[in-house]
Amino acid sequence: MNILLIEDDLDTAEFITRGLAEQGYAVQHEGDSPSGLLAAASGDFDVIVFDRLLPGMDGVDAVKLLRGSRLETPILMLTALDGIEDRVAGLEAGADDYMVKPFAFSELLARVRALARRKPMVQDELQLSAGDLLLNRATREVTRAGQPLDLLPREFQILELFLSHAGQVITRTMLLERVWGYTFDPKTSLVQTHVSRLRAKVDKPFAVELIRTVRGAGYMLSAEQDDV
Amino acid sequence: MFRSSVYRLTLLASVAFFLVALFIGGGLTVYNLSAIERNDEAELLDTYEWLREMIEEDGLQGLREEWQDEPWMTDPEEGLFLLAEEGFAFLVVGASGDALMGLPDLAGAPPGESWQTFVLEEHEDEEEIIEARLLREPIGDDLELIVARSRSWAYFDVQETLFVSIFFLIVISIPLALVIGYALSRRVHQRLDDLSGALAQIGHDSLEQRAAVSKRHDEFDALAENVNAMLDRLQALHRNIESVSVGVAHDLKTPLSRLSSRLQLMRQDINQPAALASHLEGAEQQLEGITRTFSSVLRLSEIESGDRRSAFQSLDLSALVADLIDSYQPVFADAGRQLDSAILPDQWLHGDADLLVQMITNLLENSIEHGKPSGRTWVHLQGHPQGLVLQVGDDGPGIPAAQQSRVFERFYRGDASRSAPGNGLGLAIVRSISELHAGDIVLLKGQKGAVFDCYFPASLAP
């Protein structure tokens, strides 16, 4: 996987580059907006990680420029600004995801992977599946090994997110943002509680565990046992 | 002294007053004088008519007989005296222009009305000047009658009154204006000086002092009260900033020192992977706490700036609360607690859903953290005469009365040790979110547990 990192802070850039390289990804690093835009326009990347505050040009304007020139590469925006308005501005400009510094590397990795493997069709698929687990988006029915599972609406949403990103790590923050729509971090174990209830329904009565905890990162749903 | 605006204003007012007085006095005088003139003129005509009738009826001979004993009939000097004393003189002139009878000095008068000045030489070289109005008209074909009437005394009285008035106006009112202006400006200055002295003192020393307010309730007191109100606000802001910076510093001190000791431990245990991993985890936890504190402070300032208000929308608070209860039901169950709710459906509010969720979440988390084990927490959303009331309460130990007034302060924590989790910003954020929504949040007194009521203004469904 090819990743373009546009980040002016050298420490952060090294931290990200090293982490991604350890995962076997090729990372090209640019330190300012103009060279970053040039690289983005000329290279073939799977994901662009874009710092919001760059010398030369605001990241939001740069992303607008890229989207204006019909560049479709998924963009993950990084920022030190923790305002919801900044988040909205970034997403409206055309970024696909948004992360606030400081962050854990596992969080960045999970999001980069989710962006890179996101296939547009997945969003529209009527039926999602992993192993013997089936989720029907239209009828909102979930079955495992033919047995219907009785899920609460929240649990259904969580499972839907897991299934559409099967084999990828989904972090706690991603769940909060996408299932609950919260941009703040509750102190309590809101996500853990709901996920463990979901796991009790989806996995407990069955031999194969589909949803697993990825230590220090989040959760992953996978039909293959050696995927972690 | 002339730099004092009060003094200048007083002088200006005095000058204006003086000019107005002069104008009125002058006007009245002119009016009086012209009335007197008209009167004099009428008297002149009357006298003329009277003499003419006498001459026409009795002839000159008759007059001569009538007044034969009067000295002024023969002596021109006496005639002038008569004009001076009685204001009356006359002369009858024949066809050839010769004086037939009366005061010869009048002979030079032109026909019709005219003025003439006479000089009466009194004893000891004193002269009296007599101004007189003359009328010369023919009687029949061969006689001409000239009548003189001097100005009446009233005329001179009025003139004199005017001059005396002007004199007193100048001599008395102008110095008086100066004195009053000075006294007034001194008084105003004194109060302004007091106030500006007090302000200078406050600027120099401390925000604790206040400008003195007298019992007069005048504009200076209003100014002093406004200044004091401003100082109160400034002082509160100042205290706030102080408490925030002290709070941040305190709040960071503990995790930073723990982080530092974790790093030292890592150096010690550098060859023991298991120990290293646990130190790393500990260090990450401390950093997470620090980041959380900063996020909360930034969040608080974002809320208090009021910028979020521009994104307010009409939202169904009942649905929002119900959804939140659904989400938290399992969390409470796992904590061995009970979460009850009574929600009046279809209650709308103009606001920010994300912030309202955070506000209620903070209250719920507070009750999990501080409530008694296996206790009960409830959320009620009800109507209220002025809008909505949201109640979040628990049956825990509650908050000691002494601390109740401070729970919404930033960085305030019931236990001063800062060892308990949390940063003392949760309830401060709750209050700022409530205030952003024009809400009023109170901690109910005399309750068994901690019960918060938040009153929101009513909003109609869109």
Image: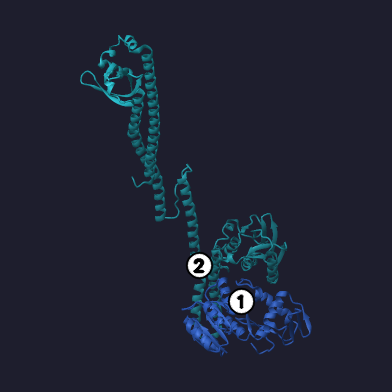
Chain colours: A blue, B cyan
Placement of the C terminus of chain B among the 4 image quadrants: bottom right
The vertical placement of B449 against A121, above or below, is above
**Residue B434, quarter of the rendered image:** bottom right
Residue B433: percent from left, percent from top: 59, 63
**Dot 2: element:** helix
Which of discs 1 and 2 lies nearer the camera? The answer is 1
Residue B255: percent from left, percent from top: 52, 72
- Give, as a three-letter code, the residue at label 2: Val
Residue under numbered circle 1: A173
How dense is the environment of label 1, judged by Cα within 10 Å: few (below 14), some, or many (20 and up)?
A: some
- Give, as a three-letter code, the residue at label 1: Thr
Can residue A57 be seen? Answer: yes
Outermost residue toward the right in this view: A147
Residue B411: percent from left, percent from top: 54, 64
Q: In this image, B75 relative to A24: left or right?
A: left
The vertical placement of A142 against B241, above or below, is below
The vertical placement of B281 against B222, above or below, is below
Instruction: Give B95 or B399, whichever is nearer the viewer.
Output: B95
Q: Are marks 1 and 2 on the same chain?
A: no
- Chain of the residue where label 2 is placed in the rendered structure: B
Instruction: Give B55 or A135, whichever is nearer the viewer.
Output: B55
Q: How far is mark 1 from mark 2, CA to CA? A: 25 Å
Number of numbered discs visible in the structure rendering: 2
Outermost residue toward the left in this view: B125
Residue B121: percent from left, percent from top: 23, 20
**Dot 1: element:** helix
Residue under numbered circle 2: B248
The reply to whether the C-beta atoms of the residues labelled 1 and 2 are less than 8 Å apart is: no
**Residue B386, quarter of the rendered image:** bottom right
